[in-house]
Image (cartoon, helix red, strand yellow):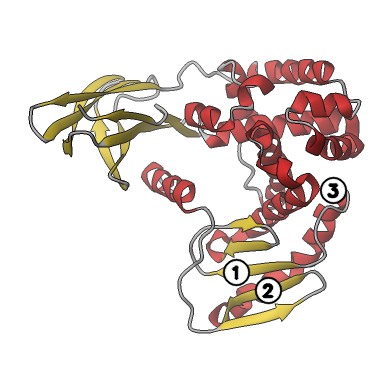
Amino acid sequence: MGPASVLLCAAALAVAGIASGSTQSQQTHTRTDHFVLAYPAEDDQAAQSFLEYAELVYADIDSLLDGALPDSLQVTLVSDGTSGSTDGAIHLSLHHGLELQAIFARELTRTAEREALGEAYELLAYRFVTEGLAAWVEARYEARVGTVRPRDMWAAFAYMQEASYPEYLASYDIAALDLGRNVVDAAGYSFVSHLVDTHGLYGLHSLLRAMPANADICGALNDARLDCDSLVDGWQSALDQEAGRHDFSNVPELWSLLEVSGEGDQRDVALRVYIQNPESSDYLFFVSYIIDEKRYEEAFPADASEFRALVPLGQVKEGEKLLWEVAVWSHTIQTWRRSGWQDQIIR
């Protein structure tokens, strides 16, 4: 999958959440010990392959997370769309192929977290931990098929950006806009990994039990008798060592400013884009913007490692709110560098 496809896919994930999949002519249902499985009749072979490991994955996740999974879950396989979960229900897209087992493990983890944490699962201050735990479990299964994402490197990059501290990561949405969700979730992954390395699964279970009675991760760690300061210091030391294994000097940087001109009800709007890209002098950058709840995405060529451009976005009604973001793929860190979403009322 090329950078353009990845960006479009990521945007779809951010907006769509759990996909319902395309309309199927006929649904088949199968019951196992812990699942009621629904799937398109034409995908019977894929469903049977899924059933070969579904109960084994359930048992593994339930053991890892101290018996937090519900006894019965609705699982729906769809031919396309995206994967995700809600309370008691999981949607899985068959287009994931060999990665489906890892994604199933991730969604089971999220389901177990909802059961264990209750309303605390929705706290933004915990999001980097809950998503980090889901990524930690997913990585265990990715390793089986050789598709492990470079989460340790992403976490080290967050550390180099001074963005790997609980106080910063507690503002999950802001951190994800600044660094990209892959990087923020990887920081959470490394936090969970360090917690388990230091205190074992007992430490993880103790933290999960303490989180519902707290509103921040340090309070929960201290209530679980895991000593937040000591754990965070050890984690930062581990991240510092990991950062020393990578060279981030060529990671692209980018900025964007909105320019409005003209008079009357319709104003001419353009985006002033600045990119420093030591990786290449010939690449694409991508502009996403939202006007009147309609989302647009366009790709543009860049022809210099220090690049400036004025990108016309057309005419926008005065008083309308415009949101925009610029992104460029980084080969160094194998993920997107983004300007972060910005917004402005057109005046």
Asked whether residue 74 appears in the rendered view, the answer is yes
Q: Which residue is mark 1?
A: 77
Q: Earlier in the sequence, mark 2 or mark 3?
A: 2
Q: Which residue is mark 2?
A: 37
Percent from the top left, x then y, of residue 244? 65, 15
Percent from the top left, x then y, of residue 214? 78, 31
* Amino acid type indicated by mark 1: Leu
Residue occupying the point 58% across, 61% down: 97
- For marks 3 and 1, give the CA distance: 24 Å
The image quarter in which residue 329 lies:
top left
Percent from the top left, x then y, of residue 188? 68, 32
Q: Are marks 3 and 1 in contact (CB under 8 Å)?
A: no
Q: Which residue is mark 3?
A: 64
Residue occupying the point 28% across, 45% down: 292
Q: Earlier in the sequence, mark 2 or mark 1?
A: 2
* Amino acid type indicated by mark 3: Leu
